[in-house]
């Protein structure tokens, strides 16, 4: 084993010297806690794979060090200020970290289920599986604690800390992080929802459409309305990679069609979902197909914040008539996504959140129904390593972190009730990777693979 100095590393800047806890929940965090269910937890998955031989002690110390920089990941929810639910320091309760052999099954702590009770444990679980040449890091984050970008920032700090502990060449210091008490101002600005007279905009009809609009639900191709009895192992993510050449062709194809790559992927997803609902007879008369897309609210002048939620959602709906007209579908999606880029701080979803601040019962009424809020979720993540706070060295496009080389990245967003598929797009190593996870209560891995294959086939046709 390589000689290291992981017991006494150079001190790093903590998130802030100011008092942090207790912290009131932001509107988005409250939404995530309210919509959390044991069968459909508001948690997302990030998985990193490495080549090399892991030094467990150094890795565990790196996790502990990164947690000092990201306080929300070591917090729980308890009544505090004004007897309202707040984030408080978890004390001796720390994120679960489990080491095991490569291929060893992932087991959940406590009640043994995927659900994370934020009143009893922190919103982060970590499993490490390794042998002499490979390491698989699987992480489960509660979305009330941080968004996907926040998770990459935390994991980037872990890898930066581990690189210093395993004899890496000189690496720059990580930047000091701002106090997370300021995170709410970045994710929600009430001034953006006021009229010229200083009153809240009366757009609740649009907000209610988000919560109560009729959307089509995906059905299994094998047994409609019948839950599967053999849930597949966690995390159950399937993926497909378009290599560097195909990724380049895809960018050129999108450009020739007057699109961004993200718009092309969104268009092909709508086509795939439309075809799936027709084949499974989940007829569109029951509602429109709706794709939910996370939108990052971070602005260039935002102070460097520890892992938290600075995100909103957009709900993009299309009916059967428009789905049958490819040119009009393409044009309409391009216009809507362009508008969202400029108005992401004022989405209908955020308008719903504004409404719940004044009328808290509205949120509970909207969420505690067996309502399909979206048919599926599509998150275009890009290259997660570009969200790291420190630029780590690269070898052939892959991140070098000490004695480990980051070879692959996977993950998927949370899955809400009746949202039967959740998809992430990654572009690490210059390849384009599509990751999908389907509802394990209704879909088996064969069905998940079938849906992925149909989506990939739709995308491939544009390369011809």
Image: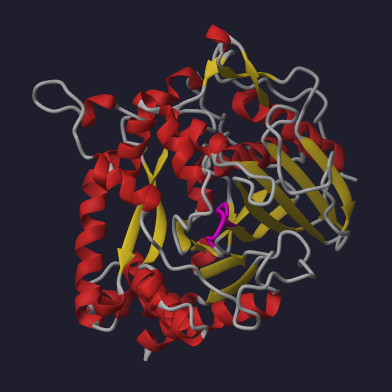
Considering depth in this image, is 302 or 311 the residue closer to the camera? 311
- Quadrant of the rendering where the N terminus is positioned: top right
Q: Residue 332 in the image: x percent, y percent? A: 21, 68
- Residue interval drawn in magenta: 412-419
| 95 to the left or right of 75 | right
Question: Residue 254's image quarter?
Answer: bottom left
Considering depth in this image, is 103 or 131 the residue closer to the camera? 103
| 321 to the left or right of 298 | left
> What is the number of callouts on the image?
0
Specify whether residue 265 is in view: yes
Question: Residue 336's image quarter?
Answer: bottom left
* Residue at horizontal 77 percent and vertical 28 percent from the top: 94
Question: Residue 156's image quarter?
Answer: top right
Q: Residue 125 in the image: x percent, y percent? A: 73, 41
Q: Residue 100 in the image: x percent, y percent? A: 89, 51
- Quadrant of the rendering where the C terminus is positioned: bottom left
* Residue at horizontal 67 percent and vertical 55 percent from the top: 48
* Residue at horizontal 78 percent and vertical 48 percent from the top: 113
Q: Residue 412 in the image: x percent, y percent? A: 58, 57
Residue 417 among those drawn in magenta: yes
Give the overall secondary structure of the magenta segment.
loop
Compared with residue 14, is residue 65 higher up or lower down, i.e. above or below? below
| 132 to the left or right of 224 | right
* Residue at horizontal 35 percent and vertical 68 percent from the top: 288
Most extreme residue toward the left, as rendered?
196
Considering depth in this image, is 422 or 432 the residue closer to the camera? 422
Residue 130 among those drawn in magenta: no
Considering depth in this image, is 355 or 65 the residue closer to the camera? 355
């Amino acid at each position: 084993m390589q000689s290291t100095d992981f017991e006494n590393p150079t001190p790093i800047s903590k998130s802030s010297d100011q008092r942090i806890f207790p912290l009131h929940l932001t509107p988005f965090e409250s939404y995530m806690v309210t919509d959390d269910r044991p069968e459909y937890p508001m948690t997302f998955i990030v998985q990193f794979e490495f080549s090399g031989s892991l030094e467990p002690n150094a890795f565990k110390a790196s996790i502990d060090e990164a947690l000092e920089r990201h306080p929300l990941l070591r917090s729980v929810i308890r009544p505090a200020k004004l007897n309202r639910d707040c984030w408080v320091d978890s004390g001796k309760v720390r994120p679960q970290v489990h080491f095991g052999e490569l291929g060893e099954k992932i087991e959940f702590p406590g009640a043994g289920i995927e659900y994370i009770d934020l009143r009893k444990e922190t919103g982060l679980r970590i499993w490490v599986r390794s042998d002499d040449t490979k390491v698989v890091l699987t992480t489960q984050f509660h979305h009330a604690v941080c968004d996907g970008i926040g998770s990459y920032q935390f994991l980037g700090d872990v890898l930066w800390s581990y690189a210093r502990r395993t004899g890496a060449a000189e690496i720059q210091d990580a930047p000091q992080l701002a106090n997370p008490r300021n995170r709410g101002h970045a994710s929600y600005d009430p001034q953006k929802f006021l009229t010229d007279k200083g009153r809240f905009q009366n757009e609740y009809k649009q907000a209610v459409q988000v919560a109560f609009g009729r959307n089509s639900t995906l059905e299994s191709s094998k047994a409609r309305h019948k839950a599967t009895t053999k849930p597949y192992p966690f995390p159950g993510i399937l993926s497909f990679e378009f290599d560097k050449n195909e990724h380049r062709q895809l960018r050129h194809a999108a450009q020739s069609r007057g699109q961004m790559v993200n718009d092309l992927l969104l268009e092909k997803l709508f086509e795939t979902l439309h075809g799936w609902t027709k084949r499974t007879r989940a007829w569109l008369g029951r509602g429109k197909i709706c794709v939910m897309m996370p939108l990052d609210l971070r602005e260039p002048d935002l102070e460097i914040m520890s892992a938290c939620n600075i995100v909103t959602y957009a709900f993009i709906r299309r009916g059967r008539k428009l789905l049958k007209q490819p040119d009009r579908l393409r044009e309409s999606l391009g216009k809507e996504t362009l508008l969202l880029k400029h108005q992401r701080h004022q989405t209908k979803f955020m308008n719903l959140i504004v409404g719940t601040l004044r009328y808290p019962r509205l949120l509970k009424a909207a969420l505690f129904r067996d309502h399909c809020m979206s048919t599926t979720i599509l998150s275009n993540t890009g290259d997660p390593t570009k969200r790291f706070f420190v630029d780590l060295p690269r070898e052939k496009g892959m991140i070098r972190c000490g004695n480990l080389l980051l070879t692959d990245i996977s993950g998927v967003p949370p899955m809400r009730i009746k949202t039967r598929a959740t998809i992430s797009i990654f572009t690490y190593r210059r390849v384009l990777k599509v990751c999908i996870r389907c509802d394990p209560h209704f879909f088996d891995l064969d069905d998940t693979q079938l849906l992925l294959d149909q989506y990939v086939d739709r995308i491939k046709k544009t390369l011809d």
